[in-house]
Amino acid sequence: QVQLVESGGGLVQAGGSLRLSCAASGTIFRINTMGWYRQAPGKQRELVAAITLGGGSPAYADSVKGRFTISRDGAKNTVYLQMNNLKPEDTAVYYCNSQGPYGLDSWGQGTQVTVSS
């Protein structure tokens, strides 16, 4: 089992920045991919950014390219999402996700991000 705890959400004005953190614990050695998803009211959950722990370029949704950056600190077992130039349409609950072999698929509890215009 992998446990994920997000932090860093909040209320920010359009054009502002926030950094989300996701701390992983448990059987973290099984994780090969970590990502951030978001879900706005009345919409489906969507992938925002993902990173493979073995290397390679991160993946981003087109809507956040150039504004959001996903990164990780292996020593702290933590993944970050730096969000710059936030827009009202970025308002959503953001969820951390980890995936691995044998059906490993874990989710955090979510953190609210609200961007005011």
Image (cartoon, rainbow, N blue to C red):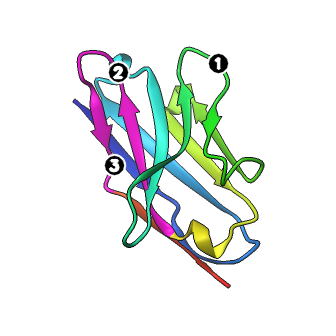
Q: Nearer the viewer, residue 12 or 24?
A: 12
**Residue depicted at x 45% and y 51%:** 46
Q: Earlier in the sequence, mark 3 or mark 1?
A: 1
**Residue depicted at x 33% and y 34%:** 25
45 is higher (above) or lower (below) than 47: below
Determine the secondary structure under disc 3. Answer: loop
Q: Residues within 10 Å of mark 2 (few under 14, many from 20)?
A: some
Disc 1 marks a residue whose amino acid type is Gly
Q: Position of residue 64 (x, y in %)?
A: 67, 52
Q: Earlier in the sequence, mark 2 or mark 1?
A: 1
Q: Which residue is mark 2?
A: 100
Q: Nearer the viewer, residue 16 or 59?
A: 59
- Looking at the image, do the residues carrying marks 2 and 1 touch, with CB atoms under 8 Å apart? no
Q: Position of residue 65 (x, y in %)?
A: 72, 47
The CA distance from mark 3 to mark 2 is: 15 Å
Q: Position of residue 114 (x, y in %)?
A: 54, 75
Q: Which residue is mark 3?
A: 108
The CA distance from mark 3 to mark 1 is: 24 Å
The magenta span reads 92-109
**Residue depicted at x 42% and y 62%:** 111
Disc 2 marks a residue whose amino acid type is Gly
Disc 3 marks a residue whose amino acid type is Gly
The CA distance from mark 2 to mark 1 is: 16 Å
Residue 105 located within the stretch drawn in magenta: yes
